Image (spheres, rainbow, N blue to C red):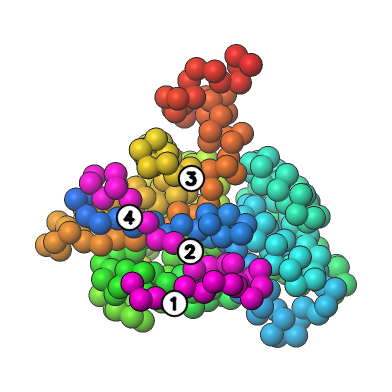
Amino acid sequence: MGMTVPIIRENTLELIGNTPLVRLKGPSEAAGCEIFGKCEFTNPGASVKDRAALWIVRDAEARGELKPGGTVVEGTAGNTGIGIALVANARGYKTVIVMPDNQSKEKMDTLRALGAELVLVPPTKFADPNHFVHTSRRLAEETPGAVWANQFDNIANRKAHIESTAPELWEQMEGRIDGFTCAAGTGGTIAGVGMGLKEFDETITIAITDPHGAALYSYFASGELKAEGSSVAEGIGQGRITANLEGAPIDTQFRISDEEGMEWVARLLREEGLCLGLSSGINVAGAIALGKELKASGKERPRVATILCDTGFRYLSTLYNADWLRSKDLPVFDWLREGSSAST
Ligand code: PMP
């Protein structure tokens, strides 16, 4: 393609971003469109959140808040913490992560393995002062030389996607992109990619794909923050308009169930050899819905991109575990039905 491929990246932080984009065969056929997935699981921390971590740390350095030997404190469902721990190690900082104790064991083990100090708290409402986000803010305030990453309301998060993910997508799709969609945790990805893509082409449709149990579908559909149902998907599902979501250019919205997301997780694994987390499956289902909608509005073979947020290897004890799925009343993947941990 005449593109210059950098042979050597000058330092490990340059391994973040510049992720491949892949055409997804099954989803493209199902939608009668071209559906593309941005392979964020190829980041060093195996998730989309490495980008936010890098931008947040660099921003704190640039503002003079983070000095050599300092500490980065964050409240996170896991992936942001993994990204921060890697970036902090590379830049010589300590990491303290506050996490709800219902997240996957793999994420907790990974954070400990990376050398982060892990503080587990019970899951609770955002209004509760013991919520993991508020706990992390207090810890940052109490720790000398510490900064609070504050991924939800620190817009260095969405800036990562305005400045890296969006231009990468634009270039990889050669400027031919009709729609983009993904789910929101902090909202950094959907807002940042949406804003960045609209700078290239105002007519690209930006859709938010919300899981059940989150309030953004209803917010963008009717202006009311109202949640319905529930979801076991980690890392997504937001109940408020975070600073990262403020002014996000959302044109339309979809709501996708865990079962539908799991169907695509299963198909992508069995038919295309991709092992992903549930938020990626929900994103792909959203991309199919967006593709169909663009097609119905007269667009011929629309080209839609979404995010493959993290690796399924992070969920071996949950999404890929028959007993866990049964305990959540979710369907068990066919190939896990025999030889589940019950028989070992
Ligand atoms: N999927 C997973 C697995 C995540 O960890 C996150 C991060 N919270 C997201 C999706 C959503 O990304 P964002 O925070 O940029 O909305």
> Nearer the viewer's eye, disc 4 or disc 3?
4
- The outermost residue toward the top is 343
Kindly identify which residue carries mark 2: 19
User: What is the crowding at mark 3: few (fewer than 14 residues within 10 Å), some, or many (at least 20)?
Assistant: many
The residue located at (66%, 78%) in the rendering is 58
Q: Which mark is first along the chain, 2 or 3? A: 2
Q: State yes or no: residue 14 in magenta.
A: yes
Q: Amino acid at mark 2?
A: Thr
Residue 57 x, y percent position in the rendering: 68, 74
Q: State yes or no: residue 46 in magenta.
A: no
Where are the magenta residues, as a range? 1-30
Kindly identify which residue carries mark 3: 276
Determine whether the beta carbon of the residue marked 3 sits less than 8 angstroms from the nearest atom of ligand 1. no
Q: Secondary structure at mark 2?
A: loop
Q: Amino acid at mark 3?
A: Leu
Q: Secondary structure at mark 1?
A: loop
> Nearer the viewer's eye, disc 1 or disc 2?
1
Say above or below: 193 vs 281: below
